[in-house]
Image: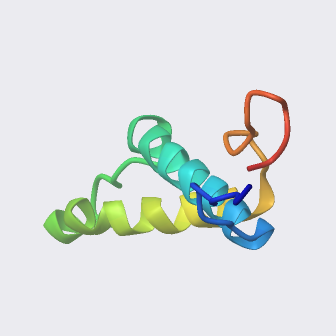
Amino acid sequence: MDVVQVFPVVSSHARSSVGNRLEEAFLEEMLKYCGPGPSEGAFSGGAGEGQFSSFLNREYASMMAEKLDLGLGLTPGGHHE
């Protein structure tokens, strides 16, 4: 009997990076609403600050995802994907 592999084998490093990217996306969306807002007053960044704040949120999310394990990459059995 021949066994045919249906799903590609993914290394544990690639699995953890998929979970990490999911956590980054989740944290980036959360930071849009509850993260640091644009400054006001004389020391604000003006129109550019509002336009480039998404890049800063993405970097914050990336750094947080490296340090935190939210468990979003877990399979239903409780194992990291």
**Nearest the eye: 17 or 63:** 17
Q: Residue at x 23, y 59 (%)?
A: 50
Image side of residue 55 versus residue 41, left or right: right
Question: Where, by quadrant of the figure, is residue 17 drawn?
Answer: bottom right
Image side of residue 65 versus residue 37, left or right: right
Q: Which x, y percent locates residue 58?
A: 45, 63
Question: Where, by quadrant of the figure, is residue 18 drawn?
Answer: bottom right
Q: Residue at x 33, y 60 (%)?
A: 54
Question: Where, by quadrant of the figure, is residue 24 drawn?
Answer: bottom right
Q: Which x, y percent locates residue 41?
A: 28, 55
Q: Which x, y percent locates residue 40?
A: 30, 52
Q: Residue at x 73, y 36 (%)?
A: 75
Q: Residue furthest top?
A: 76
Q: Residue at x 75, y 39 (%)?
A: 74
Image side of residue 2 versus residue 27, left or right: right
Image side of residue 69 versus residue 43, left or right: right
**Nearest the eye: 49 or 78:** 78
Q: Which x, y percent locates residue 66?
A: 73, 64
